[in-house]
Image (spheres, rainbow, N blue to C red):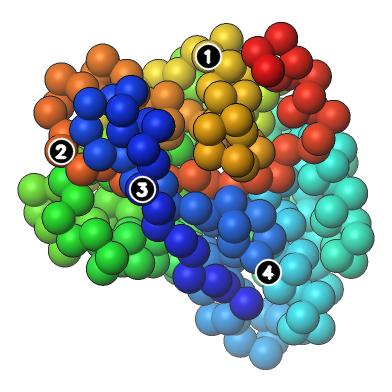
Amino acid sequence: MVRKTPLIFSEPLSDRAGFEIWLKLENLQTTGSFKLRGASNRILQLSSEEKARGIIAVSSGNHGRAVAFLAKRLGITARVVVCSLCPENKRQAMRELGAELILYGDTQDAAQEHADRLIEEHGYTSVDPFDDLHVIAGQGTIALEALTELPNANMIVSPLSGGGLLSGIALAAKSISPDISVVGSSMEIEPGMVRSLEAGKPVHVEEHPSLASSITGAIGLRNRYTFPIIRDFMDRAVLISEDSLAPEMARFADREGMIVEGGSITSVIAALSPEVREMNPKRAIAVISGRNVSLSTFQAATAAHC
């Protein structure tokens, strides 16, 4: 079910950056994003009794799609709670995979609170999108694959939101190569993890519509795992502007031949940033986390830049 995804050298990006940039293509993962790795590792650990109760997840789209895909193949009843910020194409993909889609509220926090109530009332088994050790370990296999192929890489750049992806990557990468730099790319309009790190504890942030909807949202005030892991193992976070997404998505489609999500392109923008250049990387891996943007959204966003 989970694919070993390609790691490819990008000559156009390397020329722009002045150092080697390699792309870990999680956009070619089975469900279109890295989320299948963590969801698989969590769901495959469930007992028969936990599976029988049915599973429930909160998602901005990609995690829910992975959960629905796995549940369908394993014969498990799945429910996914999404808020109004979840794109319609991702909602439809979850429905087509057989998940019961529950639309609630205008923020991820509201969706999570509703899911918590449903768990309390019905005993559903939660499959957390990021703050779960099995999920974190599953995402860490990205770094294991990449560094097996490119052991002399000295930096990994990855999107950062709730922190499940970057936590897994940081733990795996630092265990293999303690000197490797781990950089997170986060949206400047609502960098929940970054603001929490600044405050020294998980804090609430406002949620706004974004072309990078896959990496928006808070980290949860009850965050147990990703906050301390990111705090201790991430070397730097780079904040990405909303206005920078569409031009780089268009350029990536033109030069690399792939349409990717706004959240995915943040790792490319970060790799090209002054903040990363001053860290003097020689060989960086940028994680392209997903492709699940609708064609109409992509065309509308990038029309002026094509």
Please tell me which residue is depicted at 21% across the width and 43% down the height of the picture: 283
- In three-dimensional space, the C-alpha distance between marks 3 and 2, rounded to whole angstroms, equals 13 Å
Under mark 1, the amino acid is Ser
Q: Earlier in the sequence, mark 3 or mark 1?
A: 3
Residue 288 bears which disc, if any?
none
Q: Earlier in the sequence, mark 1 or mark 2?
A: 1
- Res 9 label: 3
- Local crowd size for mark 2, using a 10 Å CA cut-off: few (<14), some (14–19), many (≥20): some
Viewer-side label of 1, 2: 2
Quarter that holds the C terminus = top right
Measured Cα–Cα span from mark 1 to mark 4: 39 Å
Mark 3, secondary structure of its residue: strand
- In primary-sequence order, the first of circles 1 and 4 is 4
First along the sequence among labels 2 and 4: 4
The structure residue drawn at horizontal position 89% and vertical position 66%, both measured from the top left corner, is: 98
Residue that badge 1 annotates: 244
Task: Give the number of the disc on residue 125.
Answer: 4
- Find out whether the residues at labels 3 and 1 contact each other: C-beta distance under 8 Å: no
Disc 1, SS: helix
Q: Which residue is mark 2?
A: 282
Looking at the image, tell me whether mark 4 or mark 3 is earlier in sequence order.
3
The Cα–Cα distance between marks 4 and 3, rounded to whole angstroms, is: 41 Å
Which of pointers 2 and 4 indicates the residue nearer the eye?
Answer: 2
- State how far apart marks 3 and 1 are (Cα): 23 Å
Instruction: Report the amino acid beneath label 4.
Output: Thr
Disc 2, SS: loop
Residue 44 position, x and y percent, is 58, 81
